Image (cartoon, helix red, strand yellow):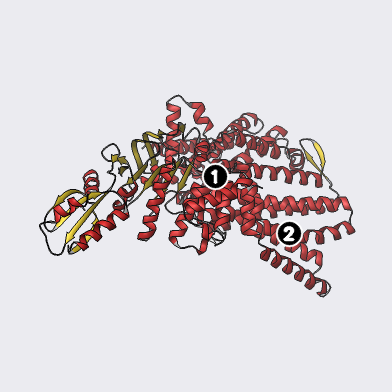
Amino acid sequence: MIEIRELVFEYPGHRALAGVSLTIVKNSITALVGPNGAGKTTLLRCMAALETPYSGDVTIDGLDTREAPRAIHAGLGYLPDFFGLYDALSVRRCLHYAARAHGIGAGAAAGAAEVAAGRVGLLDRMEQAAGQLSRGLRQRLAIAQTIVHQPKVLLLDEPAAGLDPKARRDLSQLLLSLRDSGMTLVVSSHILAELEDYSDRMVIVDHGRIAGGESIALKTGTRLRIVLAAPRDDLKDFLGGQGAQILEASSGQAVVSMAADAAARARLLAALVEAGFAVADFTEDTRALEDVYFAQTGRGA
Amino acid sequence: MNPELQRNLWLEASPFRLALIAGLVLLAFAAASVAPRGLATPSGTALALYWFFAVLWGTRSAALSVVAEIRERTWDSQKLSSIGPWEMVWGKLFGATAANWFGALLCLPFILLPAAHNTDLAQALVYGVILLALAVFAQGVALLSSLVLIRRNTGNWRLDTFLCQVAGVGAALTYYSLWSSVSAFRRSGTSTLDWWGHAFNLSNFHLVSLLLFLGWALVGCWRAMRAELRFANGPYVWLAYLLYSAIYSAGFESWIGPRLNLPHISSPLVTKLVLAGLTLLTSTYSMVFLEPKDPVRLRWLGEQVRNGHAYKAFLALDCWMLSYGATLVVGLVLAVSWTTNPDGALSVLAMLGFLTRDVAIFVLMRGRAGGKGDFAALAILGALYLLLPTVLTGLGLPGLGFLFLPHGIMGVIAGWGEGVAIAWLALTRIAR
């Protein structure tokens, strides 16, 4: 869906992208991670045909960003890291304008606005001014504006920044539903812990290059770390009996892999407590992802 | 409806705001009608309010229609929209100023009805067209300025808005003062203007000039908006504007030439070339100051030329480069044509050398100091043209003035020597 070949982008006195090559497959979610100033935002802006690279090519669905930026814009949604809204307009008017601005006819714009609002759960806020929304709801409205025209490609720059845990969880669900509806998503993020929830692949950008030279496939499912206050030798057997895949286990703690399903996790926790295990910690384990990240970027935790 | 216009109307023309403006205008008229004789008249008040709404406040609204998008971080989403450049321009120009136009149009009948009563209907209508065109011109110049300024990425939206407002109001005041001078000319017995050897009615000439410059301002907005929306512009529209402005200014030779009465040093052709050259020179300095001169882009242009893609590079030339090229061409033709005054021809050649130096200083300083480099370049030029010649004169060395001022054969050598040296420095820095 997205082909990037030997992309070079320069700011005066600084090479932000130094020969990036990358392929992003259709109907997937790719996470862009990397330290501040690594070039993630520049890469996204080049993909969005908002910046002209010094050399190299970006093609989206067969269209070159340099040759056909407007055609690319028509099939693309982009949410910048610091986005803005028309605060004085209601949610309905914001979405109506976004629909009309993306070429949806006057007759269909109201319907498109309703559909987009429904997808992000804003239908009950349609008459509220954008300026009165909480940060999480503003984020949802901004995403609704970017998907109102049903783009094939959605680029999101740090969409989870500043969101509370519930809003982040909702965002993960939203991203998955957008992918399942046929979109190709590229999401830049600092928050490694959540990437495995929704990303199919991870691309580590460092010093304007793709660390390791290519994207990394992420496991589906969730890794959970379970720590007991009072060690028990039957922990491993018990977890095996619950259907979890045991990655490592001792009498005091275990790491298991299971489906990325909140209900399944809740059932496992309830079963542990019911069986009398003194659960001191029950958290997502991101060490593996972090290990990959730090190995590629060469930075210690 | 144009979505950009509709959004602006939602934001700018709320019923409350319009009612407030209508109430204030009516109150102002009521106060003027009961004011002591000589203090204020309804038509005078209406004219002042028209200027306030349409020009003073209108230019601010027009400038903010772009600057506020940057400030509120909504510009990227606008650039990604399907709205075309012309739709975007007129949606902003008339949408962002909707409340201003509401106030201004309320005032217009109070200006034109007394004018029709005192003169005749045709003259009042022409006056009405001038007032309307003047306001659109001022707002168009403010919008164009904002589109130029955002490319400089100053980050100071208040200053940007103010500068755009100054540009718009300045353009309107300049034209209005010229228009006002028409009646003074009439009183002195001059009712026609010679332009390219033809006598034109002064009023009509001013009106047509205003409409043409308004047209160019709108074309400028459209072109700048195209660049923002990632359309390739190409050089031809700017070249057409340069040609137009050169022809327009050269035409005044018919009016200026006989009044100068200097046949021994200047022919009509030379005067025309001087007028056209000065216009192009002004355009070069203005654009080299205003445009970004991004070193990365300049290096890319150089690579295109080196790789044999000269036409591709030509299509991507900035306005300042085209203006500089046009100035060089007209300057060289002028120097060759000025056979009656060899000193004048040498001064022109020297001036072209100093122009090359000055353009190179802007490019060099931009590469060293970013956006602030343009102001540093202005300071350097101030020192080169004012301070250093003054110091030399103070030291009793006025003979060395040729180093900094375009005069004589030494001026030609110094100008081109400095020009080539600084251009080499600038190119070396860009190539790094």
Measure how far apart labels 2 and 1 are at the Cα level.
31 Å
Quarter of the rendering containing residue B331: top right
Nearest-to-viewer mark from 2 and 1? 1
The furthest residue to the left: A233
- Residue displayed at 45% across by 24% down: B308
Residue located 59% across and 36% down the image: B348
Q: In which quarter of the image is the C terminus of chain B?
A: top left
Indicate which disc, 2 or 1, sits on the residue closer to the N terminus: 1
Element under disc 2: helix
Three-letter amino acid code at the position of disc 1:
Ser
Left or right: residue B276 versus residue A94 is: right
Image coordinates of residue B315 in percent, x first then y, are: 53, 31
* Residue B304, disc: none
Residue B248: percent from left, percent from top: 70, 39
Q: Does the CB distance between marks 2 and 1 fall below 8 Å?
A: no
Nearest the viewer among B368 and A139 is A139
Task: Say whether residue B391 is visible.
Answer: no
Q: Mark 1 points at which residue?
A: B81
Residue A66 vs residue B190, the one in the foreground: A66
Q: Label 1: chain? A: B
- Callout 2 amino acid: Ala
Seen from the viewer's position, the closer of residues B79 and B10 is B10
Residue A6 at x, y = what percent? 35, 33
Residue B427 percent across, percent down from the top left:
42, 36
Q: Which residue is drawn at 45% across and 28% down?
A: B305
Mark 2 on the same chain as mark 1 = yes
Q: Residue B104 carries which label?
A: 2
